[in-house]
């Protein structure tokens, strides 16, 4: 007999938090040494997630003699890199018009094509480094389940045509093909893009960490950085609780945890995203659902959900629970609220009624970084010796790879196609102070939820609630 909480069937060994299901599946990595004291390097990277790991990987491959250190508060892959939905997607965060306004439409098209190539770059590196991350390039399906969503989906596909997406990059699915790929209850229309792969994110993080260590990068864990300082007497610095690390360049790769650094409290907003995963589903359930191609799946609601069919035949589904904690606080181990578990389970059953008896095995959450204009950025200041990348707004699995290669070229002072992309050097104003920041986020997501309710009940066009939320958010 399974346990039940608030009407939700749970497995007997249901877990909440403990970082994520992805780590429960493979086990937490063994600890690496902490920083033994003050040190000097050519490049010091703060944060051992995908951004930091990719940056170290490409720098060390390009210049093996570089002395590189990664400084990580927990363990490499502890944050969003080991908790995300496993979407290796070419979707890029931010307004294409904003990027194009400063650099022109073609520059944004170039950025989108760089994202297409980055999906395959990650796959190629994983293969070359022997990283078995359950990679399957099945593509991405967006599905509309009410008339308003269908209008947005069609408009979105038409808009992408103007930003470098050809017919082979995205298309509307015929109803027969949509039903053949995956049976989503109430689906009115769907689009498909081949530029997306499923991954097991913790496997990728652990494998990438091992790869950079093999290359000779010093990866220090259990090392908290409290402040990053610009160059003084020729050296920038990362101040840690275990000593000061000086370097020619210090790269901030802290994403949703950036607010923990001195002076960075309002730089990026740490947005929460939560996930649940079912037990492995039996063949009779999959006969109702289909999903034989293991495409990634997202609905077209405002408070959207995203899902994958895992390599061991579970469904992992995620979305916003409590979107923001007052004062930019972040969790420590990934525990999420029971009401969020209930919400995600209801969305699972709504999309896939055949899962009504499927038990939930694990729930967790993590934080992602949101800039004030919702646009990702990568930057390096040669005068101060400080650089950063992030603000991925949930699209970081692929974007981190592009960021790592771009930071490599910036550090090495190479003028390349990557350093000319329109997200390079972009800076925006900070978020408002509290309590305005907290109140604003609560209002935005209340409006998004109201918009979804309105559209599900009777709306045929995008709700004015959603338009107001987008206006307030600055998206």
Image (cartoon, rainbow, N blue to C red):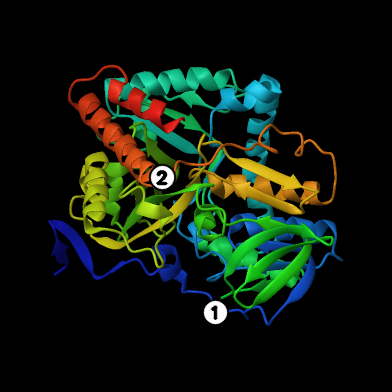
User: On the image, which quarter does residue 23 sit in?
Assistant: bottom left
Number of disc labels: 2
Residue 272: percent from left, percent from top: 39, 51
Question: Residue 473: x, y in percent?
Answer: 42, 33
Residue 405 drawn at (x, y percent): 73, 48
Residue 165 placement (x, y as % from top left): 59, 24
- Mark 2 — residue? 292
Q: Are marks 2 and 1 in contact (CB under 8 Å)?
A: no
Q: Nearer the viewer, residue 130 or 211?
A: 211
Q: Give the camera-side residue of 104 and 342.
A: 104
Depth check: give the residue in front, 107 or 40.
40
Q: Is residue 145 left or right of residue 396?
A: left
**Foreground residue among 327 and 249:** 327
Q: Give the residue at x 64% y 56%.
A: 252
Residue at coordinates 48% horizontally, 74% vertically from top-left?
28
Lower sequence index among marks 2 and 1: 1
């Amino acid at each position: 007999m399974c346990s039940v909480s608030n009407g939700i069937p749970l497995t007997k060994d249901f877990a909440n938090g403990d970082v994520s299901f992805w780590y429960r599946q493979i086990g937490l990595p063994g600890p690496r040494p902490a920083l033994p004291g003050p040190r000097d390097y050519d490049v010091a990277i703060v944060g051992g997630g995908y951004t930091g790991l990719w940056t170290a990987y490409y720098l060390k491959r390009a210049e093996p003699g570089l002395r590189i250190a990664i400084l990580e508060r927990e363990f490499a892959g502890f944050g969003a890199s080991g908790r995300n939905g496993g979407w290796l997607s070419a979707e890029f965060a931010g307004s294409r018009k904003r990027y194009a306004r400063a650099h022109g439409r073609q520059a944004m098209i170039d950025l989108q094509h760089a994202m297409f190539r980055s999906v395959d770059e990650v796959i190629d590196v994983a293969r070359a480094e022997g990283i078995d991350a359950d990679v399957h390039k099945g593509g991405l399906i967006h599905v509309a389940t009410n008339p308003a969503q269908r209008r947005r989906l069609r408009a979105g596909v038409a808009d992408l045509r103007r930003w470098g997406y050809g017919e082979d990059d995205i298309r509307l699915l015929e109803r027969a093909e949509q039903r053949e790929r995956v049976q989503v209850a109430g689906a009115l229309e769907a689009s498909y893009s081949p530029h997306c792969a499923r991954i097991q994110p913790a496997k990728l993080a652990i494998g990438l960490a091992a790869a950079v260590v093999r290359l000779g990068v010093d990866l220090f864990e259990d090392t908290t950085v409290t402040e990053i300082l610009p160059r003084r007497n020729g050296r920038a610095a990362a101040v840690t609780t275990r000593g000061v690390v000086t370097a020619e360049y210090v790269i901030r790769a802290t994403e949703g945890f950036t607010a923990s650094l001195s002076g960075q409290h309002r730089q990026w907003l740490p947005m929460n995203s939560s996930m649940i995963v079912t037990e492995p589903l039996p063949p009779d359930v999959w006969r109702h659902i289909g999903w034989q191609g293991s495409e990634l799946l997202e609905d077209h609601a405002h408070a959207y959900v995203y899902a994958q069919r895992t390599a061991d035949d579970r469904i992992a589904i995620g979305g916003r629970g409590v979107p923001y904690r007052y004062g930019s606080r972040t969790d420590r181990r990934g525990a999420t609220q029971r009401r969020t578990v209930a919400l995600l389970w209801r969305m699972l059953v709504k999309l896939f009624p055949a899962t009504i008896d499927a038990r939930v095995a694990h729930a967790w959450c993590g934080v992602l970084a949101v800039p004030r204009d919702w646009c990702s950025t990568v930057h390096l200041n040669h005068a101060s010796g400080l650089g950063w990348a992030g603000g991925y707004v949930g699209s970081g699995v692929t974007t981190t790879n592009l960021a790592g290669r771009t930071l490599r070229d910036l550090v090495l002072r190479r003028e390349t196609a990557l350093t000319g992309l329109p997200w390079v050097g972009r800076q925006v104003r900070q978020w408002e102070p509290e309590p305005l920041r907290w109140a604003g986020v609560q209002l935005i997501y209340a409006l998004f939820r109201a918009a979804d309710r309105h559209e599900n009940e009777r709306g045929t066009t995008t709700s004015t609630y959603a338009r107001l939320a987008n206006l307030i958010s600055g998206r």
